[in-house]
Image (tube, rainbow, N blue to C red):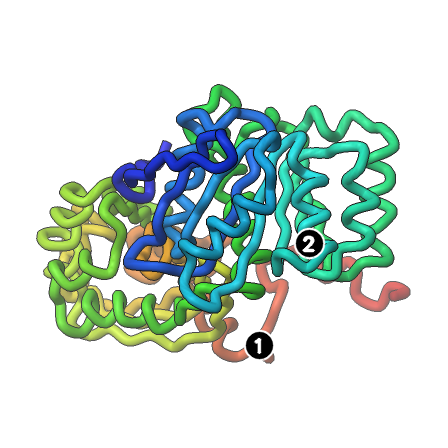
Amino acid sequence: MPAPHTAPRSGTWIEIEGTRCYAVPAEGGSGPGLLVLDGVGGLDAATQAWCDRFAGDGYDVLAATAATPVDPVLAALRSRAAPGAGLAVVATGAAADVAAWLGAGGAVAAVVVHGLTPGLPAALARCACPCAVQLAAPDLEGGAALSAVRGLLGTLPRLRLYEYPGCGTRFFQRGDAAFEPHAASLAHTRTLGTVRPAIGPHYDLARLLYEHLRYEFVTHDPDATMGTMVEAPYVNHVPTMTGGVGHDMLKRFYKYHFIPKIPQERRSIYLSETIGPDTVVLEFVTTFTHDVEIDYMLPGIAPTGKEVRIPTVLIAKFHGDKLYNEHIYWDQASVLAQLGLIDPKGLPMAGVAEALKMLDQSRPANELMANWKESEGKPI
């Protein structure tokens, strides 16, 4: 399982209307206000860790149980958040309909709920702000509330419904027995996709990623590269499983096995850029001369001096304004074929033609499909 995004943050306990609430300031100073209404865990350690993560994304977080009077909690949150900043609410379990009614009343600018309550559909129907409902397996067993929420999807374009049929109720909270890291990561991105456009904070993720890449490939500075990342990042070059998990392992990788082993003759043509609430996906074709043993791509293979062109996809996920992880994909079989290390004859694989096709869509397609000729002239 990946390392945590950052070292645990330190929240504080404050008393509101005779009940304890958990407060965490935004990473790097004040930010928009995020109310967490906990109707499941009672502000236990897993809920606190969840709040810490939101604080790392730039939110001033105040968490209360579903039994706490909501008006004084909102007032306390407004006093803690950045002046003039918007507010949003994320709720679990029994607090779901309370959160939706806050949206319906205009008290918050975005609503995300994990779980169903009988009153949730009626509240959502009156909610004018962006809303997301995220449901685990126990919520998907049927019932009138589920049918009613699904029925709203066709009439409320601001509403999103996300289902996680293989997950337990608190799959999204690290430290809970039901925690599922991959579904939790997706749910967190979807939460930010609802909250961030409404209240911020707004980060130029593409600029931050290109700055990170410049330190790698232009200035060749491992210290500056690590400075763009969270305290415990990870990187995985998927075909060769090279990279690192955590600061020390990753810096060792960058300093001794990545930056010094970048080919001198290397250039990239970017084909597409997709930006999400916490993710940037780059698609590009890289051309390089195999003039050095490339530890991260071709470990143990002496330089051949041959040119390689390869389509590549980089998926970068951020935590706040810091890079958390990178997944980098390419077709290793194509690389090996271009270097003469494997013979592609008779195999369903292509060499440099992969890259050329990406750069020119008019080039021939389906040439590896022997059966393609069988459909020629058949009715379409």
Amino acid type at circle 1 is Gln
Measured as percent of width and height from the top left, residue 31 is found at 40, 60
Looking at the image, which residue is at 48% across and 42% down?
185
- Label 2 SS: helix
Relative to 345, is 247 above or below?
Answer: above
Residue 350 in view in this figure: yes
Write down the residue under mark 2. Answer: 103
Quarter holding residue 155: bottom right
The answer to whether 346 is drawn above or below residue 210 in the figure is: above
Image quarter hosting the N terminus: top left
Where 261 falls versus 124 (above or below)?
Answer: below
Picture coordinates of residue 350 (x, y %)? 47, 60
Q: Amino acid at mark 2?
A: Gly
Instruction: Report how far apart the C-alphas of labels 1 and 2 lie in the structure.
Output: 47 Å
The count of marks equals 2
Dot 1 alpha-carbon crowd within 10 angstroms: few under 14, some 14 to 19, many 20 or more: few
Q: Which residue is mark 1?
A: 361
Q: In the picture provided, is 278 more to the left or to the right than 170?
A: left
